[in-house]
Amino acid sequence: MILSRALLTLLLLETTIFIFTDAAKPQANASAVVKIGIMHVEGAHVISADRVLAATGLKSGDRFDPDRLNVVMQKLGKSGAFSDLTYTYVPQGAVVKIDFKVEEAKFRKCLFDNFVWFSTDEINSRLQKDLPLYVGVAPETGDLLYDVAVDLEKLSLEKGVKVHVTRRVQQAFIGDKDWNHAYAAEGVKVEIKAVHISGNLTVNPNELQKEANLLVGREYSAFGADLFGEKTIFSFFADRGYLRAKVGPSAVKVLQRSEGSEGFPVEISYPVTEGSLYRWQPAEWSGDQSISSKDLDALTGMKPNDVANAKRIADGWDAIRDAYAQKGYLAAKISAEPVLDDTSLLVHYRVALVPGPQYHMGSFLLIGLPPKIEEHLRTQWKLNAGDVFDAGYAKDFVKKEFLPALQSGGFLGRKISSQMKPNHELQTVEFTLKVE
């Protein structure tokens, strides 16, 4: 009979653990030794049942001890691997059958940022050997995260590398829901000494290598190296019209150390598929028509059959935003979708324009200026309250009027600022020039 009436609920780290009290211990002769019989795990998916049992440290044939079982359950709860964890046991003569029921927590991938004295496969293999609840992923919280760091320090020491291991949340962007755990080794220098780019490439190799060498001399980080490939190296090709170029992932190789040197010199390699070079065709404009298609085409700064330089294209979108801001549309949105023709090797963009609300001039504030300079600037300011606010005019005013006035008055050594503060309810802008 299952002794369910004697359950005691223990709330631990948001994990519910049901434990039998002493009153429910199997009754046997004082001289009899009750042993653990069959153990079963229900609900294990990411972590196998065998690994859950291994993590308990209990084995069939061991002496059954409810107190020890309680300690084991607390340890499993603190690991963070389970959002819910219960057990029951059934006396079967001289043995006890134990049933565990688990609900697994949410798991995250583990990344290893600069452990160049290991391969990632070697790290995962050793961690899974040492830590039964580690299976290449780890829970969002709990003691298992600390255990991984401690084991990485121990494994590194086996390689003769003494480090302190830290963990951080690795996000692609702020608020990224698909974040990972990233472990890094501190106390050892891993310096990038060389960068190699491979592939069937047509770009100028000297220019490419100059761009790649921006990474030389930096501390190695796998995340940083991949980001450099995705941003800097990819941009090198995209800015030359290779809009389908593919870079990476990066690979790291430890170079031979000179005698007496410390740390690890490394070379980073990037495989690159250059792809085809694309040329520009005029965009398709949809949405707002307050700026003509002809003017929009001119603002892109691109002409038909120009090399589709990604930077020039991005600058064109910025120029269009500035043009809208000059008309008071400070929150204009531009959605640009590239359409690449792989036969003609031409690209055009489908661009949707949403100007948003139009803002008007509100207050013009001058703070911290002597009366003479303030009076001069007020006479030069041409936007009156209620006029359509021109963000371009405001920027030019700072450059052509405000800064020269400060320079003539000997104020340039002070802290100066300008601020355009929109009032979204009134759709007005408060423009402030300040000297501290």
Image (cartoon, rainbow, N blue to C red):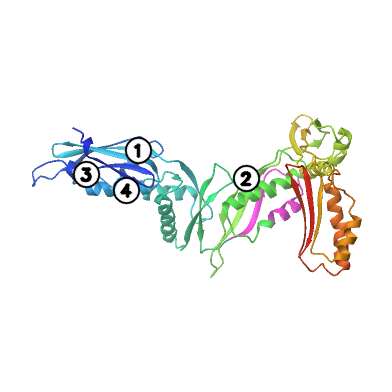
The x and y percentages for residue 31 are: 8, 47
Q: Quadrant of residue 323?
A: top right
Mark closer to the chain start, 1 or 3: 3
Residue at image position (13%, 37%) is 93
Q: CA distance from mark 4 to mark 3?
A: 15 Å
- Say whether residue 200 is magenta: yes
Mark 2 or 1, closer to the camera: 1
- Say whether residue 313 is magenta: no
Mark 1 or 3, closer to the camera: 3
Residue at image position (80%, 52%) is 431
Disc 2 element: loop
Does the CB distance between marks 1 and 3 fall below 8 Å? no
Residue span colored magenta: 191-213
Residue at image position (31%, 39%) is 86
Disc 1 designates what residue?
102
In the rendered view, does 174 fall on the left or right side of 125? right
- Residue 21 bears which disc, if any? 3
Mark 4 is surrounded, within 10 Å at the Cα level, by few (under 14), some (14 to 19) or many (20 or more) other residues, namely some
Disc 2 designates what residue?
248
Disc 3 element: loop
- Amino acid, disc 2: Gly
- Amino acid, disc 3: Thr
Q: CA distance from mark 3 to mark 2?
A: 58 Å
Residue at image position (46%, 46%) is 140
Mark closer to the chain start, 4 or 3: 3
- Amino acid, disc 4: Gln
Disc 4 designates what residue?
74
Q: Of 290 and 277, which appears nearest the observer?
A: 290
Disc 1 element: strand
